[in-house]
Image (cartoon, rainbow, N blue to C red):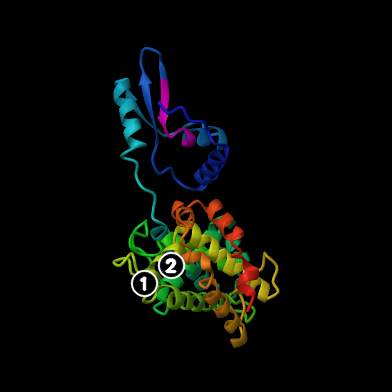
Amino acid sequence: MQPRGLEQKRLRDLALNLRRNFQLSPTVCRLISDEGQIKVFDGQHKATAQAVGNQNEVVDCKVFIDPPLEMVRRVVIQGHGPLRQQEFKTSELYKKLAANYEELLTKWQDEHPGKSISEAELPQALSKARKDVEKDIVARITESIFEDTDCELADFVSPDRKPGRYPLNYDMFAWWVKLLIKKPLASEPMDSDQNFREDERKNIIRLFNFSTDNYLQGKWKPENPENTEYKKMRKLFYRASFREWTKLIRDSLQIIMFLSPEDPVFYRQLSPEMWHRIEAICRKLITHNIWMDPNPMVETTFNSNVQRDVAELFKNRGLNPQFLCTP
């Protein structure tokens, strides 16, 4: 019914998950009486993870007795095609992850009054896998920025999966946040003076607000597509273009702060002088002539949303950290 290979990574992750959690839905099979066989047609990974990964002698299954083969085939095609359920939108998933993280952290703090903990200690303290805690922390930081009433950029984020008439969707917003934060798990205790997560959060909001004021306010006018400023900003906020110039700004900030490529730019307190230089870089970005180049191939490259092609375009036209860092 589904001639798909069994992916080892998925098998391993499912086996580990099923050791501590129940199975959300059973594997689906069909009994062929004449052959005396039961054949799996949905949930192969779960069944194999239980049997091989966890060495269970019994696997929960839902079994249909001699169903018409054509009917089964049709159900499989429809279920994995036009009727396939959508995954959570990133915004919904992040809300759930952030809420779950807050609940677990609060529970731990209630059980350990007066004690401090770092992000690095959370996996063991909360009995969670490291990668799950990392996802939770990223979700929590992203949601705290998005829901902050001071974050002006949030007003320009589409409520739907696709940007539509907005410059960004939530995936793009989350991408920019993740690009700028210190990768979890920070080793400094959360209530320590050496833990700069809150400074980092406020720094990101300040950068987002400056970008919003200079790139979007009064300029993002999709109702007037021939407007010169809108056409310029439209090129900025194609997905591939957005990813490339946000990386250029991040790389430029690492240069002016004398940081290595692995160092986060905003996990620190910044002086007014440094903010003056950061804002100068953001202003310099939109002075490049690429944004108003009349060459139709330039517009085609932006509109194609192929990140490799946009990166090559930036490189060939000299839109790079050296350009942004030059006064």
Q: Quadrant of residue 254?
A: bottom right
Q: Quadrant of residue 119?
A: bottom right
Question: Who is closer to the viewer here, 200 or 276?
Answer: 276
Name the residue located 45 percent from the left edge and 72 percent from the top edge.
144
Q: How many marks?
A: 2
Is residue 186 visible to the viewer in this orientation of the structure? no
Pointer 1: residues within 10 angstroms few (<14), some, or many (20+)? few
Q: Position of residue 81 (x, y in %)?
A: 35, 37
Residue that numbered label 2 is attached to: 232
- As measured in the structure, the alpha-carbon distance from the residue carrying label 2 to the one carrying label 1 is 20 Å
Q: Secondary structure at mark 1?
A: helix
Name the residue located 46 percent from the left edge and 66 percent from the top edge.
292
**What quarter of the picture does the N terminus occupy?**
top left
What residue range appears in magenta? 38-46
Picture layout, residue 32 above or below residue 109? above
Q: Secondary structure at mark 2?
A: helix
Residue that numbered label 1 is attached to: 155
Question: Who is closer to the viewer here, 166 or 313?
Answer: 313
Name the residue located 36 percent from the left edge and 12 percent from the top edge.
34
Magenta stretch: residue 37 in it? no
Does the residue at mark 2 contact the one at mark 1 (Cβ under 8 Å)? no
Q: Nearer the viewer, mark 2 or mark 1?
A: 2
Label 1 amino acid? Asp
Question: Who is closer to the viewer here, 287 or 55?
Answer: 287
Question: Who is closer to the viewer here, 301 or 190?
Answer: 301
Q: Earlier in the sequence, mark 2 or mark 1?
A: 1
Question: What residue occupies the far front of the structure in this picture?
Answer: 294
